[in-house]
Image: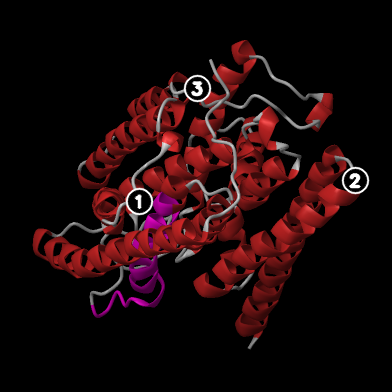
Amino acid sequence: MSTNSMPVVLLPIKGEVTKAEIIISLCFFLSFIFSLFVLPRILIISKRKLLYDNPDARKSHSEAIPRLGGLVFIPSVLIALSFSTAFRFLIDFPFNASLTGYTLLELLFLIAGSLFLYLVGVKDDLIGVRYRKKFMAQFLVAFLFPMSGLYINNMYGIFGVYEVPALIGVPFTIVMVVFITNAVNLIDGIDGLAGGGGLVSFLTFGLLYILRQEWIYSMLAFAFVGCLLPFMYYNIWGSAKHGTKLFMGDAGSLSLGYLLSFFAIKYAMYIPEHGMDKCCLVIPLSLLFIPVFDAFRVMVVRYYQRHPLFLADRNHIHHKCLAAGLTHLQSTLLLISYMIIMLFVNLKFAQMMDLNIVLIINILLAILMNYMLNMKIRQRKSAGAKAFDLKIIK
């Protein structure tokens, strides 16, 4: 498998950059407008057909809320990307050699995998899908990445590992795609968290690919930013009482996780002639650290408690934030702010120290944050118990 999935970065040409800015902006606005137009219709359909996510003991909402907001994600992105791509030819800015060979293969396999996983998510949102079948679907679409020549081929010194042979890198990539996809799906438990994290991540990757002059991937990233913005309004500021609140559901979270795993692996893949350094791994690691570490931590806790690894519970970081007394919006702002701050901190650390030390620092800080939340939860429970005892005495 070849690693030549990225073109050599050329010096920017003024006319080319201007055209690229027009195309990327068009892609963003088309996705934004389509999402803005379709989401209210999804609310109407959900109300008429009674397609609601009903509350239960493990969920963080107390009212029935439509969970079909994610239906708009992949259609918005593909419509915007297709129209913008066609428009590139009309303004005499066609794809050059950068969209041939492995790059074209990556894009086609990504679209195929996204559509397939999106449909699995739609079925799950409507009638439910057993987790084994969802895992099978995820492994199937994860296999499409290595088929296009895209896989984790370098660890940049983590655990002393640099170059990774395809025999190890391919299966490791498949496992990581499935793990990241599920981690993003699991973090989607409070208003705005998965969407906000995705928004920051796609915005970051979109800007990074502008710098690399890989316009097609920047278009793809900004198309996702465009469709997420209207959804975030309905998800965070929508009212269940007035029927304007939406969840993204599995169709949205699975699509979000799959696309994020693609961008993370694509950006981290080592290309010798590009002079890439460890920051190419630090950026994806920083953007996805919260959902990935949280999913891993929860699985470890379930294993030691002899609970089923895939049994839903309320032990995730966002559940702890709520139990510590934070609102949905406060919890989301806390975690998104932490992600953004650590992105810049990690980039600075990566210039100063070994990548293993950077990873250890991130793990220790995440453990500390969980510990502080656990302390706050215990204090609230203790205060609640004392208040209850005083009430009984009175």
Which residue is outermost to the right? 353
Q: CA distance from mark 2 to mark 3?
A: 31 Å
Residue position marked by numbered label 2 in the rendering:
353
- Residue 93 is marked as 1
Q: Which residue: 26% across, 68% down?
A: 33
- Amino acid type indicated by mark 3: Gly
| Residue 155 vertical placement versus 332 (above, below) | above
Q: Quadrant of residue 355?
A: top right
Q: Which residue: 87% across, 42% down?
A: 357
N-term mark: 2 or 1: 1
Give the magenta range: 219-242
| Residue 253 vertical placement versus 132 (above, below) | below
Which secondary structure, mark 1?
Answer: loop
Which secondary structure, mark 3?
Answer: loop
Mark 2 or mark 1, whichever is nearer to me = 1
On the image, the x and y values in percent for residue 308 come to 52, 31
N-term mark: 3 or 1: 1
Q: CA distance from mark 2 to mark 1?
A: 42 Å
For the residue pair 342 and 369, the one nearer the viewer reads as 342
Q: CA distance from mark 3 to mark 1?
A: 26 Å
Residue position marked by numbered label 3 in the rendering:
149
Q: Dot 2, how many residues are within 10 Å of its Cα: few (below 14), some (14-19), or many (20+)?
A: few
